[in-house]
Amino acid sequence: MLDQALKSDSVSLCVAESGAAAVFDRGEFSRRVPARWLRMMVLSVEESDSFAPRPALSTVIPTDVRLRSISYLEEFDAWDVQFEGENQLFRIDRDRLGASSDMLLGDGPEQTPFNSSDQPNRQIDSETLESPAAVRSFLDSLLRRGYGRIRGVKTDDASFFKILKRLGFDGSQSQLITEREVLHHDGSGGSAHLLSPHTEAPHRDPMPDYHIRLCVETSLKGGDMILVDGLNAVNTLAMESPIAAAELSRWPMLFVGDRSGSERRLVPMLETGVDGSLRRIIFNDRAAIDFACPDDRLGVCAEAYELLSRVVEREGIQNHFRVQAGDLVVIDNRRVLHGAKSGSSGERTMLCGSMDRSHIMSTWRRARSGDID
């Protein structure tokens, strides 16, 4: 039950639970704020920036803080809050109170799992990315499905950089780290690893969020690209062996980048949220070395690894499609595994780079709000 309701248009901050908490409402965003947390959000008298760091450490604020009153100040579009046992009024504005709402509401569209029945040829022409509406449509699809495809891209570094810049890369071309990857039909040159579905660079910290692959040239007959949706793979694993899924979420795997092991990382193969939903899958058969788990759990972990490796190889889980020179694929590296089928002859050269999720999300939000040229 609310003790009082003080409103600013559609925004309100109300004392609740006899001062133990406050309720902040702004449109669809509603949040219960414990009194102690509200006390920690106040700014010093000198501060004018809503997002300035807190002036006091949390450890110096008493645990039994309670609210006495809240008064809305129209001229400042802010609230003066008084706490029991303190004579001073503390000012808190709506920006600070609702700072997290944009992040919560802007986490992207709901993800849509894909499998072998998905439309493999769904793609857009590079020229259409000049349109803000096309950028929004492409990023909507990318965030929902975990991958997006663009055709007709010129096969040079400058054109590759131009596409990434349009999607949100905020550095210069010299800051874009790229590499060329050659897939041979005979399995040479390390291509056996490239053929098997895998997550890119799991040994790096941070691991690439989005992996971008542009086909520069190809004489390969066959050799379709493979994409595996981690949502489907993990759901399948969890249905067939809940214990296996739990073990892969619990015990970290050591991933290394080369023989010297100079680049290494210890991280669980499956990362789930508090609600049990998948946040990230990491699977790379070449880079995986060993589980960091007790001896009595290693056998179970090894069986779980074996089962997952077989799941990602299933035809019904995989999505296959042909790539030609000028085809660019953007892959959510936290969710989607990529690989290739064996070709009969020839080779394919891919220009590869990566982007941060924050860049993609920033462009998506600007496109959604119409703030993109």
Image (tube, rainbow, N blue to C red):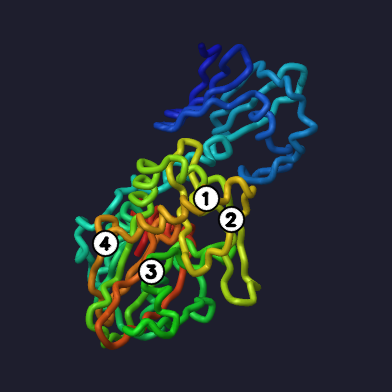
Pointer 2 residue: 291
Mark nearer the viewer, 4 or 1: 1
Secondary-structure class at tag 1? helix
Secondary-structure class at tag 4? strand
The answer to whether residue 161 is seen in the rendering is no
User: Looking at the image, is 23 positioned above or below residue 126?
Assistant: above
Mark nearer the viewer, 4 or 3: 3
Q: Earlier in the sequence, mark 4 or mark 3?
A: 3
Q: Earlier in the sequence, mark 3 or mark 1?
A: 3
Q: Residue at x 58, y 14 (%)?
A: 17
User: Looking at the image, is 92 positioned above or below residue 373?
Assistant: above
Q: Earlier in the sequence, mark 4 or mark 1?
A: 1
Q: Earlier in the sequence, mark 3 or mark 2?
A: 3
Q: Residue at x 23, y 73 (%)?
A: 322
Q: Which mark is residue 301?
A: 1
Q: Which mark is residue 319?
A: 4
- Kindly indicate whether the residue at mark 2 contacts the one at mark 1 (C-beta within 8 angstroms): yes
Q: Is residue 218 left or right of residue 175?
A: left
Q: Which mark is residue 32?
A: none
Q: Position of residue 286 (x, y in %)?
A: 49, 69
Q: Position of residue 199 (x, y in %)?
A: 45, 64
User: Looking at the image, is 43 positioned above or below residue 35?
Assistant: below
Q: Which mark is residue 196?
A: 3
Mark nearer the viewer, 3 or 1: 1
How crowded is the residue under tag 3: few (<14 C-alpha within 10 Å), some, or many (20+)? Answer: many
Q: Amino acid at mark 4?
A: Asn
Q: Residue at x 48, y 58 (%)?
A: 282
Q: Position of residue 142 (x, y in %)?
A: 33, 58
Q: Residue at x 28, y 70 (%)?
A: 150
Q: Earlier in the sequence, mark 1 or mark 2?
A: 2
Q: How far apart, in angstroms, are the residues tagged by discs 3 and 2?
A: 21 Å
